[in-house]
Amino acid sequence: MSETAELKLEGNVYTLPIVEGTENEKAIDIAKLRDQTGFITLDSGFKNTGATKSSITFLDGEKGILKYRGYSIEQLAEKSTFLEVAYLLIYGNLPTQKQIEDFQHQISRHTLVHEDMKKFFDGFPSKSHPMGQLSSLVCSLSSFYPESLDPNQTKEEFDLTIIKLLGKMATIVSWIYKKSLGHPVIYPKNKYDYVTNFLHMTFGQRTEEVEIDEVVIDAMNKLLILHADHEQNCSTSTVRIVGSSDCNLYASISAGISALWGPLHGGANQAVIEMLEKIKNDGGDVDKWVNKAKDKNDSFRLMGFGHRVYKNFDPRAKIIKKACDDILEKLGINDPVLDIAKKLEEVALSDPYFVERKLYPNVDFYSGIIYRALGFPTEMFTVLFALGRLPGWIAQWKEMRENKEPIGRPRQVYVGENDRDFVPIEKR
Ligand code: CMC
């Protein structure tokens, strides 16, 4: 007989099934709890709530393990490419040579965006944040490709929607960057692979041929792979819950982009660099800022530290830290902000406040330094996170649909006023 849990409630004993995952994590299945007992569970921030069964990404926050479809993030970052990882996440297996060639070929046929989309850029104020632009532009794809609105798309039609989104996203991201500089956009070129094409559109010039350094291509592949999925985080849960209403893929991903924007989530990579700059300009007194972060009367937090799930170390941060050292050395860059980052890490990691709360540097702590070294402005950092996370969001949306999950609709415990009689405005 499989294991069960017993719940004692108001003199009754209820038996609840236990669900066990392939990596042996266990969950109490409460799907019938309200029907059987009249009770619901309350879990603010979903700290203890499993929203789904998923076979995409496994994460062990205590041991610092992250795997996509069973492959360790360390192996993928070292040996794979972003496009290959995208295929793995979306379709479940590493592609064969033919499959990856077809995938690349199809994507390269869909990298152009509708010329009318360029007009959107004229409408955004010149200083508008790239994440707001990205979210709007991705959502607007649903207007250009209205066939995506049909929740009953065939597998082939849906695959094409995926391909279009992957292809156009890189073009949109690079065009946001170009427009922020006031430069003419660069069109995609089919001779390049996915990441090289993106870098070409971003750093290429109309006036001259620009050769993209292999070191930069390699770094970009690594960064995008490390960001490609992270199971049921804030933005991914958003994508799944929006999609659960049968909303189209473009609008669901646009909602995920908005969720990612916040500084407690993907927006932290921008916030980290801004914080490090601030500390540097303030004289570089790291202790002072660590003390501020510990002060409960001060709202300041060490950005890039702490994680909801990782309570040991963030395996992505470990890889990025090394990549950061390598890239800065290869590109011959001496960034004073990196010295501040290293000091901050050292001080925080030996401070009981951070040790007791298991607050370690997360993926965002070092990624910004690499993006800066590659030449991206700070406001583009979270957009790059979104480009990396795209295959994960697509895979999660697809899985949710294929599993025919019901519409996401949490409950609440109401704590407001009871019955009140309406009072006319002159008597209030
Ligand atoms: N600096 C100072 N104190 C912190 C920090 C921090 N960065 N993070 C958490 N704490 C403290 C917090 O005050 C609390 O202390 P106490 O127990 O005394 O009240 C304790 O640690 C637990 O924090 P929490 O806010 O309850 O933890 P959470 O799991 O709800 O939040 C987090 C996780 C990532 C939102 C939070 O650690 C944070 O705000 N970090 C800074 C922002 C950041 O770097 N975000 C990127 C996350 S990784 C990339 C991604 O996946 O998006």
Image: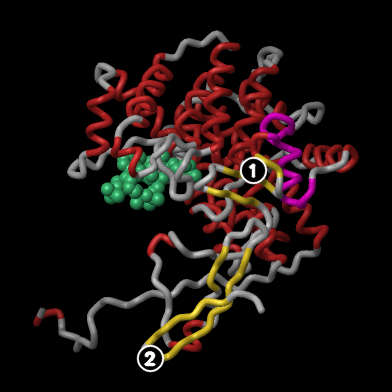
Q: Image quadrant of residue 400?
A: bottom right
On the rendered image, what quadrant is the N terminus found in? bottom right
Whether residue 422 sits left or right of residue 350 in the image: it is left
Which amino acid is tagged 2? Gly
Question: Disc 2 marks which residue?
Answer: 11
Q: Position of residue 106 (x, y in %)?
A: 82, 42
Q: Image quadrant of residue 10?
A: bottom left
Which amino acid is tagged 1? Asp
Q: Is residue 419 visible?
A: yes
First of labels 1, 2 by sequence position = 2
What residue do we see at 79% from left, 37% from top?
108
Q: Nearer the viewer, residue 245 or 322?
A: 322
Is 85 colored magenta in this rendering? yes
The secondary structure type at the circle numbered 1 is helix
Considering the whole magenta stretch, tell me its main secondary structure. helix
What residue do we see at 86% from left, 37% from top?
101
What residue do we see at 19% from left, 89% from top?
421
Question: Disc 1 marks which residue?
Answer: 116
Q: CA distance from mark 1 to mark 2?
A: 66 Å
Q: Position of residue 271 (x, y in %)?
A: 39, 34
Q: Image quadrant of residue 416?
A: bottom left
Crowd band around label 1 with a 10 angstrom C-alpha radius: few (<14), some (14–19), many (20+):
few
Is 322 colored magenta in this rendering? no
**Viewer-side label of 1, 2:** 2
Q: How is the image coloured?
A: secondary structure
Q: Residue furthest left?
A: 427
Q: Quadrant of ligand 1?
A: top left
* Number of numbered callouts drawn: 2
Q: Position of residue 366 (x, y in %)?
A: 48, 28
Residue 427 marker: none
Magenta residues? 75-93
